[in-house]
Amino acid sequence: MAATSPFPHLPEYLDAISTAPGAGHRHGTLPGCQQPGQCRHHPLSTADAPPPPPPVPVDNTPPPAAAVAPATPASNATWQLYQQVQQLQDQVQQLQGTVEEQNHTIEKLRSDDKSRYSDLDQRLNTLSDKLSQQQAAPAAMATSTAPAAASAPSPSGNIDEEKKAYLGAYDVFRTQGPDQAIPPMLAFVGRYPNSIFTPNAYYWLGEFYLAASPANLAEAKRQFEAVLSKYPDSPKAPAALYKLGTIADMQNHTADARKLMQQVLTQFPSSHEAVLAQTYLNPPADPPKPARKKKATNS
């Protein structure tokens, strides 16, 4: 008969203690327990755990100042737009000044042309008065001296014809332009070389050659010189001399141009051309340009 153990439940008690969490025992005393960490009967203790890795050093040093891009006004889109607006305003002001200068020059040219062309009618009226006086004088002498002289041809028909031909050539210029007016005016000079309108015809031929397309400066100069050489006492002499100075200036002969303008002042000091010559020799100061607005500072 087998002996009965006084502690029948001791094996179960011991097994429960050995398998409880945290229970310890000597390694190798239980089956399957060889070393720590490989046995369910002996959990890995803190002493047996491997040491933690060393901490990685962190560099908290700020970057150098040169690496940080400085903030500039050019990087601001609003500042760039402001600069563009200021540049446009400056350009507009410069253009306004140029326009004012050109308007001043245009007005001066218009004034010169108006005075020159309006003078034509006045001189034509003067010539008509002289013609009337010349026609009356021979008629009075003929009636007082010899009765046979009354049958002599009257110059009135020729003078009227000359006047008609001269004004006809000038009307071509007014209606069709200088290129078309040159042939009839040349025809008048060839047909009536001794007419009282011939000095004016030479002068207007010079004007026509200047205004032609293209301008013929050499031929215009020759016509103006004909006025001065053949008819130095003609009312067109001051204008012809002034035109010669203008042609010299157009040909970049500044010294000759100034010399001719000075001759206008010396020979015809009371003429309208003397005023123009004085303006050429001593041009007026340019008109003042509009004040430029002060740029606003960026604060």
Image (cartoon, rainbow, N blue to C red):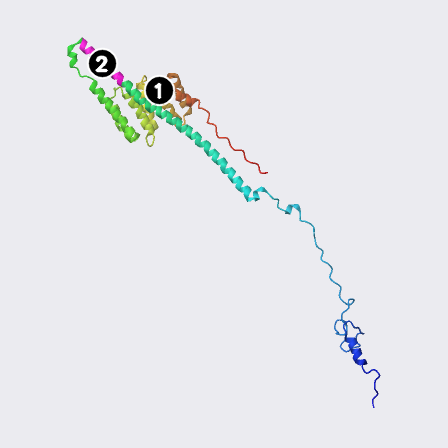
Quadrant of the rendering where the N terminus is positioned: bottom right
Quadrant hosting residue 58: bottom right
> What residue type is disc 2 on?
Ala
Q: Does the magenta stretch include residue 22?
A: no
- Which residue is more in the foreground, 297 or 285? 297
Look at mark 2 in the image and give the residue it sits on.
Answer: 136
Quadrant of the rendering where the C terminus is positioned: top right
Q: In this view, does 212 lie above or below 23?
A: above
> What residue type is disc 1 on?
Pro
Mark 1 residue crowding within 10 angstroms, few (<14) / some (14–19) / many (20+) = many
Task: Provide the major secondary structure of the magenta segment.
Answer: helix
Question: Residue 84's spot in the image, x, y percent?
Answer: 51, 40
Q: Which of marks 2 and 1 is nearer the N terminus?
A: 2
Q: Residue furthest top?
A: 145
Look at mark 1 in the image and give the residue it sits on.
Answer: 238
Q: In this view, does 275 lie above or below 70?
A: above
Number of the label disc, if any, that sits on residue 128? none
Q: Is mark 2 on a helix, strand or loop?
A: helix
Question: Residue 213's spot in the image, x, y percent?
Answer: 33, 32
Q: Is 248 situated left or right of 297 in this image?
A: left
Q: Do the residues labelled 2 and 1 touch (CB within 8 Å)?
A: no
Residues drawn in magenta: 128-144
Q: What's the CA distance linking mark 2 and mark 1?
A: 30 Å
Quadrant hosting residue 53: bottom right
Q: What element carries label 1?
A: helix
Q: Residue furthest bottom?
A: 1
